[in-house]
Image (cartoon, rainbow, N blue to C red):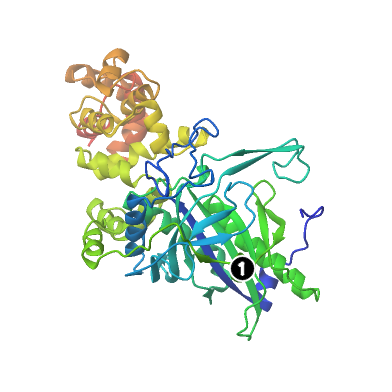
Amino acid sequence: MTQATTDATLSYDEALAAYDPVMGLEVHVELGTKTKMFCGCATTFGAEPNSQVCPVCLGLPGALPVVNEKGVEGAIRIGLALNCEIAQWCRFARKNYFYPDMPKNFQTSQYDEPISYDGWLDVELEDGTVYRVEIERAHMEEDTGKSLHVGGSTGRIHGATHSLVDYNRAGIPLIEIVTKPMVGAGERAPEIARAYVATLRDLIKALGVSDVKMEQGSMRCDVNLSLMPKGSNTFGTRSETKNVNSLRSVERAVRYEIQRHAAVLQSGGAVTQETRHWHEDTGITTAGREKSDAEDYRYFPEPDLVPIAPSRESVEALRATLPEPPAARRKRLQSAWGYSDLEMRDVVNAGLVELIDETVTAGASPAGARKWWSGEIARRANGEGTDVPSYAAQLGVTPAHVVELESLVTAGRLNDSMARQVWEGVLGGEGAPTAVADARGLELVQDTGALDAAVEKVIAANADVAQKVRDGKVQAAGALIGQVMKEMKGQADAAAVRELILAKLT
């Protein structure tokens, strides 16, 4: 039941002074297969409600499931990428629970016989520290449908006048990746949680098995958290914050639950084992339902599906398809591009690695690629509430445009100021860089006579500044350069102007 009031919390520092957090993360990843896990229904996101259903995923009597081979391959590739053991034999189980948005009223999942188990993933934090997250298992299951609660103010069932159910998502292949309890993270627990989910997202995206769009629910995280008193080795009672769907929210949810648990324990109370709802707007969690243990789900082997027994040859063939790990690739690219750690971190955080890689491959310099993708277009994308790759695709701006723009500067047609004007035109839909430069009449003046006359005019009009340069104060030439650029209406090469001024005065 949703709480009417906000729970008490302890300050983060006070909480960490008295307790050690224990964290477990369950990340659900929808596979990007064309059809569902046990039937041939489409998996297109955003389709008309209940338009992608059939007797199997609706759980109608007599309808029998068939395993999606691509779903199994995707699960094995994820397991391999997580350094897991791949089961030589495993099977599905029925997880019995009242699912209002799963019409057959049980979920086909795996429990004690998962497809992959005992893995690990190294996570690099911003300061370079590497934290190894142990993986308990990564098992196959199916997603549930989606409930829409109508009439209330929160979008949740409490206070709603009625509910609608869309079964399109029911049956979509889902991989649940479960960590072992993370002990010893201390005050860095929220940071580690965020970094783990980010690293996992990058890894799965590189595998090409999911679009991992957290905002659309194709990747979401359940945060399990408990506290141990300092010096104790006994885990406390855990809460499970469900369906957290952004990296920022994962970090905030861990921090909030540490503070909430600590306040309960410090007051002499007992933490309730329950699910929690995360509220993005207020940054708090509220109670959901009391959390069941595994035995409450009454798992038993799924009688309608044959066991899965991947051959060692097929597993090794799938291992050969694994891409270069994202972290290793980033280090290689950083070295090749000559970026500093801070520059590379900014590029990674902005989601620009792929765009810059494509741009450099197309012929741009690494410095130029970073400059143009992380400048004005990034500012505009941020204003639109999206990322640069999505915004660039929306505008039709490509790496080829950056290459063309840089070539205009390199060839001496444009200076940096002109190039920025051209780039604004490209982003405004005026065409490719050369076409924008032609239409706007942007081109450096190549007439040395005109440039020489402008320099002479400025020197004559600023005799005192010119004398300072003659006296050895070369930095004073900056004021003259600015005046010449103004005289030339910006259509001159500042470096050439400086050389000409110094040639005349020194």
Q: Residue at x 65, y 82 (%)?
A: 230
Using the image as rendered, state which of residue 136 and residue 262 is in the foreground. 136
Q: Position of residue 403 (x, y in %)?
A: 23, 33
Q: Quadrant of the N terminus?
A: bottom right
Q: Position of residue 61 (x, y in %)?
A: 54, 46
Q: Is residue 412 above or below residue 140?
A: above
| Disc 1: which residue | 225
Query: How many numbered marks appear?
Result: 1
Q: Position of residue 142 (x, y in %)?
A: 48, 52
Q: Residue at x 18, y 17 (%)?
A: 449
Q: Position of residue 501 (x, y in %)?
A: 25, 31
Q: Residue at x 68, y 72 (%)?
A: 15
Amino acid marked by disc 1: Leu
Query: Can you name the residue that lies furthest to the front here?
Result: 62
**Side of 149 relative to 116 (left or right):** right
Asked whether residue 8 is in view, the answer is: yes
Q: Is residue 273 above or below residue 233?
A: above
Using the image as rendered, state which of residue 431 and residue 273 is in the foreground. 273
Asked whether residue 473 is in view, the answer is: no
Answer with the quarter of the image where residue 267 lies.
bottom right
Label 1: how many Cα within 10 Å (few below 14, some 14–19, many 20+) = many
Answer with the quarter of the image where residue 33 lies.
top left
**Side of 228 relative to 56 (left or right):** right
Query: For numbered disc 1, what is the local secondary structure?
Result: strand
Q: Quadrant of the C terminus?
A: top left
